[in-house]
Image (cartoon, grey):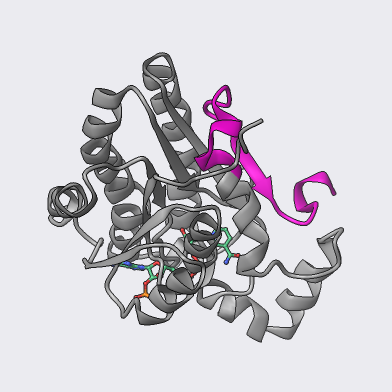
Amino acid sequence: MANPFDLSGRTAVVTGANTGIGQGIAVALAQAGATIVAVGRSSMDETGALVRQAGAEFHAIAADLGSIDPVKPIVAETLKTFGSIDILVNNAGIVRRADAIDFTEEDWDAVMSINLKTAFFLTQAAAHNMLEKGRGKVINIASMLSFQGGIRIPSYTASKSGIAGLTKLLACEWAVKGVNVNAIAPGYFVTNNTMALREDPERNSSILARIPAGRWGSPADIGGAAVFLASSASDYVHGTVLPVDGGWLAR
Ligand code: NAP
C-alpha cells in the first residue's frame, strides 16, 4: 500500500519558515518528501540547510508579509520555479501585548494585517492553482486563542479567532473542489513569540502548571500534524482546527 503521508512531488509554501513553528513545519514536510518554498523577511539559510539535509529541494522568497503587496509575486515565483503549489502553510504571525484599555490602533492593525489579512489573500492567490488542479492543502496556524480569550492580546485573539472562522468558510467553499483547508492550533511552544511569557516567572509557572504534558511544546512537536494535514491521509478532513497543545484544552 502506498504511504498516505508521502509528500514526494509536492511543493509546499511555508511562510515565516526561518524559525520556530514555521521552521519545524518546513523540516517535517521536507522529511516527508515535499519541496519547500520558504517565505519571509529574515534569512532562510538555516532552514535551507535543514531542508536540504532531509534530501528535499529548497527555494527562499524574501517578502515582508505585513502587507499583501508580495502575495501575487510569491505565487508567481513559486509557479515559475516549481510549476505548482500543492501545500500552503500560513504560519507567519506576530503578537503585541498590552492591556485592552491601553491597546493602540497601530498594534491592532499590525497584528490583524499579517495574521489574518495576508493569510487570506495569500490563500486566495495560491488557490487559483489548487482549484485548477482540483487538489491542494491549506494549513493555517491558529492558536489556543482561537478557542479562548486570553489576556493582554486583543488583536492576537481577534486574528486567531478570525483565522479559525476563515478556515471553516474556505473549507465549506472548496471541499467539493478537492482543496482541503484546515488549521493547527499550537498550545504553548518555545519560540520567539512566547519569550515574554517564559521570561515572566509567574506566567511561565502558571502556564506550565496547566499543561497536562508537563512541558512547553518544541517546534518539532508540530511536524506530524502538519504532514498529516498536507498529505492524502487527510483527504476527507475539512475545516478542522487541530489542537497540538500537550492537552491544554482538555484541562
Ligand atoms: P516566531 O518564532 O516569532 O515566528 C514568527 C514567524 O513569522 C517568523 O518567521 C517571523 O519572521 C514571521 N514574521 C513576522 N512578521 C513578519 C512579516 N512582516 N513578514 C514576514 N514574516 C514575518 O513565533 P512562532 O511561535 O514560531 O510563530 C509562528 C506562528 O505560530 C504564528 O502564527 C503564531 O501566532 C503561532 N502560534 C505560536 C504559538 C507559540 O506558543 N509559540 C502558539 C500558538 C500559535 P522574523 O523572524 O523575520 O520576525
Does the rendering let one see residue 211?
A: yes
Rendering coords of residue 28 (x, y %) = 56, 59
170, 8: nearer the viewer: 8
| In this rendering, position of residue 249 left or right of residue 26 | right
Q: Quadrant of residue 194?
A: bottom right
- Residue extending furthest front? 1
Looking at the image, which residue is at 30% across and 43% down? 85
- Residue stretch in magenta: 228-251
The x and y percentages for residue 245 are 72, 54
Q: Specify whether residue 149 is in view.
A: no
Please name whichever residue, 251 or 149, is drawn nearer the observer in this view of the structure: 251
Residue 235 colored in magenta in the image: yes
Number of numbered callouts drawn:
0
Task: Please tell me whether residue 155 is drawn above or below residue 239 in the rendered image.
Answer: below
Instruction: Name which residue lies at 15% across and 54% down.
Output: 77
Task: Ligand 1: give its quadrant.
Answer: bottom left
Residue at figure coordinates x 15%, y 57% from the top left: 70
Q: Say left or right for 168 vs 37.
A: right
Quadrant, the N terminus: top right
Q: In terms of depth relative to the viewer, which is nearer, 109 or 139?
A: 139
Q: Position of residue 231 (x, y in %)?
A: 53, 38
Relative vertical location of residue 202 with respect to residue 38 in this rendering, above or below: below
Query: In the orientation shown, which residue stands out farthest toward the top?
Result: 176
Q: Residue at x 48, y 68 (%)?
A: 23
Instruction: Decide whether residue 145 is among the magenta residues.
Output: no
State the image quarter where residue 178 is shown.
top left
